[in-house]
Image: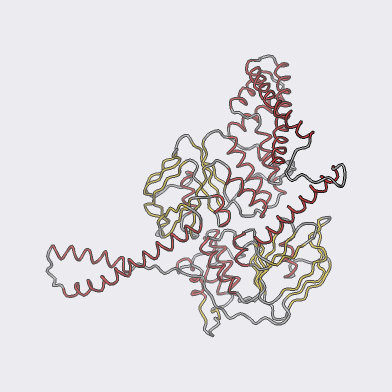
């Protein structure tokens, strides 16, 4: 089934053309990732599909039988609402039916209740409330009475995600789910949960993300937006990179041929008399086409700097028995660590575990409860924070950088100007003289990154640097950090980024405990999974040993249910179809019943029956897992 068809779309803002005459299709079951530099038109394209922007030319046809749902980076909410109230602000028919049913129970109006029950049946909304709470629970949101205004950024993101997934499950229409950077502000555990959910779900998805592991796990089609065009790649991120390299090699070969022909034709043009024949005119036209190809600029601006870093002394940074708590919440407990020259340390852990607090304590932004910090005399910190830039409302990009210095020192003894430095960070002359307030979110992050590096630090501290950065900038940043000779601390949930950069992990595991692990992020995660598996096996073995009648008995080599569990499984498999049949009969009776007391009684029976069925289903799954 075709969801979306677009032909010859063009969109410009002033003189800047974002894309020109691009065409594409989205079909049912497609899981598509969009990859492009910031400013290439990703967000604009999504807005066009949502009906929030209009293309300059071309057509977009969206199937009338589908709904388009957006999970945006900016989440709008009323801070006075509780989580449960926020979840119920959905306008989908099943949610509306559920709200009307609750209202009828409060009003005790039999006519209203009868209408509500009929609508609940039509919308198949009986199990919706349980599904909603189940999704919230899986996303670690358990207290639904909390006000939205009291939640952290990560919690708000998870609640909004639960609302979106509830909506897509509640709707029985075909849905195109559009997600713009869904992993931002989610910790690794939540990212992996969402990754697993989306990869298995039978949905149609259009996704913008900088998380390459997430992209590879979820999507099987990549749209590349570059140089006003859209290129479609079927396969993984690695396949996309390979296809892109082949395309650029072919383009360069075409340009080389055009250059050779251009030189020959240029000589002919210079020898031609003013009076030209029709035959020579066609050759002249061909000459100008060849000239256009020959002068194509395929050079890519690169974020490559070999700067003159201030020398690191013998002492870098040493933390001794650092402790920090907020009330009963212990974030750091007697933590000690000595940072070495050139060490690249990754800090990981759940949101709220204390990662950013440690960074603030190291730099003196926040007081510690106890302990000592010794910082080397030659250390100059460069801090890339989540808060972003602080700037004057009308301040221009070039002036913002010049406040630090007019020039930047390079390792070869030379210098480059602030304007040249900006060009390395993909800021053209026009953008350099624009107000910072006019930049996109990604461009502001790129400027922030440049601002940190322009101060020439020898100890970099990055707190979630990958949020809102495009993949081309991320790749160049990774290459730069790999060659960085100073010390580095990174807090990030981007697993691919961490794997490329860090050689050491400090894992915040809760209650002030920090695990010191030598290796990259994936190696740490594998270690954790292995430990968890070993502990689970030990616990199971201990339980089995307790059940054995004597010490000489051998453990079974194959998993097997106990007699009691086997009987339980047989009972569940026998009773579940009977309960389903009873539930169906109650629904039929409700549809034909007009007496208020009977309706109320049947509704209570239905609720009790649905709860029992759900419990049976969960237990059946547990027993089946024990058998496998």
Q: Work out which residue is located at the far bottom of the displayed protein and give it.
A: 413
Q: Is residue 176 left or right of residue 255?
A: right
Q: Position of residue 102 (x, y in %)?
A: 69, 28
The correct choice, above or below, for 1 with respect to 467 in the image is above
Q: Looking at the image, which is closer to me, 315 or 564?
A: 564
Q: Is residue 619 above or below residue 423?
A: above
Residue placed at 55% from the left, 51% from the top? 180
Instruction: Between residue 48 and residue 263, name the one nearer to us.
Output: 263
| Residue 308 image point, x, y percent | 58, 81
| Left or right placement of residue 426 versus residue 143 in this view | left
Compared with residue 161, is residue 619 higher up or lower down, i.e. above or below? Answer: above
Could you say which quadrant of the image residue 589 lies in?
Answer: top right
Colour scheme: secondary structure
Horizontal relation, residue 261 to residue 488: left or right: left
Q: Quadrant of the N terminus?
A: top left
Residue ranking furthest to the front: 552
Location of residue 386 (image quadrant): bottom right
Q: Among all residues in the image, which is located at the extreme right?
A: 550
Quarter of the image containing the C terminus?
top right
Q: How many marks?
A: 0
Vertical order, 70 against 590 (above or below) = below
Coordinates of residue 435 in the picture (x, y in percent): 52, 64
**x then y, percent, for residue 528:** 72, 57
The residue lying toward the viewer, choosing from 63 and 586, is 586
């Amino acid at each position: 089934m075709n969801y979306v068809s677009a032909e010859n779309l063009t969109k410009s803002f002033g003189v800047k053309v974002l894309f020109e005459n691009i065409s594409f299709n989205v079909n049912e079951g497609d899981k598509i990732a969009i990859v492009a530099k910031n400013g290439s038109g990703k967000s604009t394209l999504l807005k066009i599909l949502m009906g929030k922007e209009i293309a300059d030319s071309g057509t977009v046809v969206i199937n009338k039988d589908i709904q388009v749902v957006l999970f945006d980076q900016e989440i709008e909410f009323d801070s006075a609402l509780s989580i449960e109230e926020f979840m119920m602000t959905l306008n989908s028919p099943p949610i509306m039916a559920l709200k009307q049913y609750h209202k009828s129970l409060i009003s005790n109006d039999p006519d209203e209740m009868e209408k509500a029950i009929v609508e609940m049946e039509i919308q198949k909304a009986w199990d919706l409330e349980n599904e909603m709470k189940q999704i919230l629970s899986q996303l670690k949101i358990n207290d639904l009475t909390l006000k939205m205004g009291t939640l952290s950024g990560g919690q708000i993101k998870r609640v909004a995600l639960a609302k979106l997934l509830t909506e897509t499950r509640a709707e029985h229409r075909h849905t195109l789910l559009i997600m713009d950077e869904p992993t931002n502000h989610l910790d690794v555990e939540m990212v992996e949960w969402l990754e697993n959910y989306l990869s298995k779900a039978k949905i149609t998805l259009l996704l913008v993300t900088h998380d390459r592991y997430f992209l590879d796990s979820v999507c099987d089609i990549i749209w590349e937006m570059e140089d006003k065009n859209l290129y479609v790649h079927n396969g993984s991120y690695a396949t996309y990179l390979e296809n892109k390299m082949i395309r650029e090699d072919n383009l360069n070969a075409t340009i080389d041929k055009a250059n050779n022909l251009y030189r020959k034709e240029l000589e002919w043009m210079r020898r031609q008399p003013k009076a030209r024949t029709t035959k020579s005119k066609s050759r002249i036209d061909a000459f100008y086409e060849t000239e256009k190809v020959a002068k194509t600029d395929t050079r890519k601006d690169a974020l490559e700097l070999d700067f003159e870093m201030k020398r690191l002394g013998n002492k870098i940074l040493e933390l001794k028995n650092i402790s920090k708590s907020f009330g009963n919440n212990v974030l750091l407990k007697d933590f000690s660590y000595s940072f070495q020259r050139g060490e690249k340390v990754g800090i990981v852990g759940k949101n709220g575990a204390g990662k950013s607090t440690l960074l603030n304590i190291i730099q003196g932004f926040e007081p510690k409860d106890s302990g000592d910090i010794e910082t080397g005399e030659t250390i100059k910190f460069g801090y890339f924070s989540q808060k972003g830039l602080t700037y004057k409302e009308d301040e221009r990009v070039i002036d913002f950088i010049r406040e630090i210095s007019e020039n930047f020192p390079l390792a070869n003894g030379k210098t480059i100007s602030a304007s040249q430095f900006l060009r390395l960070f993909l800021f053209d002359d026009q953008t350099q003289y624009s107000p910072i307030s006019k930049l996109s979110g990604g461009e502001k992050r790129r400027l922030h990154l440049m601002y940190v590096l322009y101060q020439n630090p020898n100890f970099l501290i990055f707190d979630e640097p990958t949020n809102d950065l495009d993949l081309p900038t991320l790749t160049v940043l990774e290459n730069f950090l790999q060659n960085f000779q100073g010390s580095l601390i990174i807090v990030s949930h981007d697993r691919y980024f961490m794997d490329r950069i860090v050689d050491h992990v400090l894992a915040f595991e809760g209650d002030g405990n920090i695990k010191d692990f030598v290796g990259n992020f994936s190696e740490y995660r594998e270690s954790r999974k292995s430990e968890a598996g070993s502990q689970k096996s030990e616990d199971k073995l201990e339980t089995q040993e307790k059940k054995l009648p004597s010490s000489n008995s051998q453990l079974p080599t194959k998993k097997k249910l106990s007699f009691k569990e086997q009987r339980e499984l047989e009972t569940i498999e026998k009773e579940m179809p009977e309960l389903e049949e009873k539930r169906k009969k109650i629904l039929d009776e409700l549809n034909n019943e007009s007496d208020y007391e009977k309706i109320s009684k049947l509704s209570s029976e239905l609720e009790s029956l649905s709860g029992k069925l759900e419990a049976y289903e969960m237990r059946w799954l547990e027993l089946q897992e024990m058998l496998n």
